Image: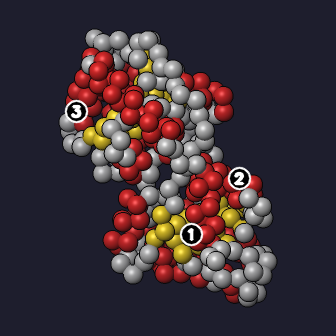
Amino acid sequence: MRFIVPGNIEYRSGGNAYNWSIVDELREAGVGVELRTVEGEWPEASENGRRALAAELGSVPEGTVVLIDGLVAIAAPDLIVETGALSGGGVPPAWVLAHMSFQDYEPAEARLMEAAAGVICPSKTLALELEGRHPELTVHVVRPGTEEADQAKGSEPPHIICVAALLPNKCQLLLLHALSQVKALEWTASLVGTDQADPDYAAQVREAIRGAGLAERVELAGERHGDDLEAEWYRSDLSILVSVHESFGIVVAESLAHGIPALVRAGTGAEEALGLAGAGRALDLVPGADAEELAQILELWLQDAALRQTWQDAAAAARADRRTWKMAADNIASLLWPV
């Protein structure tokens, strides 16, 4: 299999985590996976980017299955159509792994959906959105897995974590506004994610922390990996992901894998990741009142020990029933190589 992924997403993202984990599991199962990174300002396509993608598609050995990240594919659906011709024949059209919606890229999205051998996405939420715009399309849902993780110990006072790159869609400013309204209660928080994805927004986040007098209570932890990220999870009691748009929200599944409940925005893929086990809550946030609503539920959680215990127990139960990356890789293999 040749798996083509974008080279311009250098920070930790749900899409990257999904891609690398699937590759690792397929290789562990004995599948020969060529992971090819294509440089370019995806999803925009420069001539250099298109040439690089054409070169990758044109050098695919006969009989090889091609899987391409949707962030790259949306920029050049015509090349996906021409996969077989580019490679000299013997190579079927590429499968597309869509981590996000491309509604803003119509009609390219329609051409891509029609051209692909098949479309895989990480959530039913995203699948329904894509199928709603393309009724003739069947989208295959392969939900992500998580790594095995220790049960979080938590902290005293309670520690809140938000694992996401500092980006407007991730709504760290909203979270900080809510936290500023519960300063009378005891808590600490950390924002774990790169500040390089959008430096202007990151600067706004820093200023919001300073302006609200939260510098002693909110840590900008930066991007963390491996043991450093595990240490952040281990000391946490609640995670928050209230992105405006979220195809799935792998960090919510990771939170539950550590036995940590979560607050998410209703109507997004993060709500699907949270599930119905009661390990937190999906908030129907209303524009203009978002921070107040989030502050109210944080205040309730901080003051109600019984509620905290109920959510924690539900998260611990979800942890015991986690989905593995091997399950996800097996699902993808069954699609790419049907019996």
**Relative to residue 218, is residue 225 drawn left or right?**
right
Q: CA distance from mark 3 to mark 1?
A: 38 Å
Q: Quadrant of the N terminus?
A: bottom right
- Numbered mark located on residue 96 in the image: 1
Residues packed near mark 2 inside 10 Å, few (<14), some (14 to 19) or many (20 plus): some
Where in the figure is residue 149, as x and y percent of width and height?
Answer: 59, 34
Q: Which callout, 2 or 3, points to the residue nearer the camera?
A: 2
Q: At label 3, which amino acid type do we have?
A: Glu
Q: CA distance from mark 1 to mark 2?
A: 18 Å
Q: Is residue 315 something one can see in this rendering? A: yes
Residue 36 in the image, given as x and y percentages of width and height: 73, 62
Q: Is residue 313 above or below residue 131?
A: above
Q: How many marks?
A: 3
In the rendered view, would you say 310 is above or below 217? below
Residue nearest the viewer, comparing 53 with 142: 142
Q: SS at mark 1? A: strand
Residue 24, which numbered label? 2
- Check disc 2 and give the amino acid type: Asp
Q: Residue at x 75, y 64 (%)?
A: 31
Q: Is residue 162 visible?
A: no
Q: Could you tell whether 299 is left or right of 77 in the image?
A: left
The answer to whether marks 3 and 1 mark residues whose Cβ atoms lie closer than 8 Å is: no
Residue type at the position of mark 1: Val
